[in-house]
Image (spheres, grey):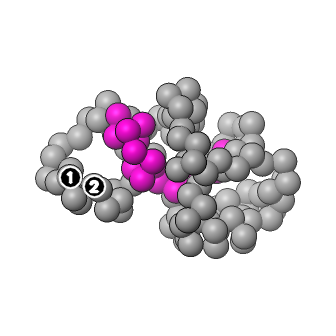
Amino acid sequence: MKKIYYLKTCDTCKKIIKSLPNTDGFLFQDIKEEPITVKQLEEMHTLTKSYEVLFSKKAKLYKEMGLKNEVLTEADFKRYILEHYTFLARPVIMDNETIFVGNSPKTVQKVIEFLSNE
């Protein structure tokens, strides 16, 4: 499956998606309008082997809820991601058995290189 989980109100997501080559055939899911399901999150976890990798510590709620002062488990990361879309690191780009998570320049460059070779 080729899918991009993003937030359409996020300028960073929009900029990254605009820069990607060969996105024909990808399904785009705005996680605010269509929240991710347990099954979708588990599919992402299968590829990353970690809910923490999928969790955004940059989220405003992370600081507001004082989560940075807590020791979170994998179960906590999963629960928070499912409770509120803002906790999913964005964008998440899945191309069958390959996944890219987040918006670091290094990750974006890897996605562009990967999709350029498709």
**Residue 84 falls left or right of residue 110:** left
Left/right of residue 19 with respect to residue 47 in the rendered view: right
Describe the element under mark 2 as helix, strand or loop: helix
> In the rendered image, which residue does mark 2 sit on?
62
**Mark 2 crowd level (few <14, some 14–19, many ≥20, 10 Å Cα):** some
x then y, percent, for residue 78: 38, 35
Query: Which residue of the protein is positioned furthest toward the left in this rendering?
Result: 69
Residue at 50% from the left image edge and 28% from the top image edge: 38
Give whichever of 63, 34 is nearer the camera.
34
- In the image, residue 61 lies at what x, y percent? 29, 56
The residue sitting at 15% across, 46% down in the picture is 70
- What is the quadrant of residue 13 in the picture? bottom right
For the residues labelled 1 and 2, say whether their Cβ atoms are less than 8 Å apart: yes
Is residue 19 visible in the rendered image? The answer is yes
Q: Where is residue 74 in the image (x, y as percent from the top left)?
A: 32, 34
Verify whether residue 92 appears in magenta. Answer: yes
Q: Residue 101 carries which label?
A: none
The residue sitting at 52% across, 50% down in the picture is: 32
Give the residue at the far top of this rendering. Answer: 39
* Along the viewing direction, whichever of 81 and 72 lies nearer the viewer: 81
The amino acid type of the residue labelled 1 equals Met
Quarter of the picture holding the N terminus: top right
In screen coordinates, is 62 left or right of 86? left
Q: Position of residue 5 (x, y in %)?
A: 61, 49
Q: Mark 1 points at which residue?
A: 65
Q: Which amino acid does label 2 sit on?
A: Tyr
Vertical placement of 77 versus 23: above or below?
Answer: above
The CA span between labels 1 and 2 is 6 Å
Q: Does the magenta stretch include residue 93?
A: yes
Magenta residues (range) = 79-94
**Any part of residue 53 in sight:** no
| Residue depicted at 78% across the width and 48% down the height | 26
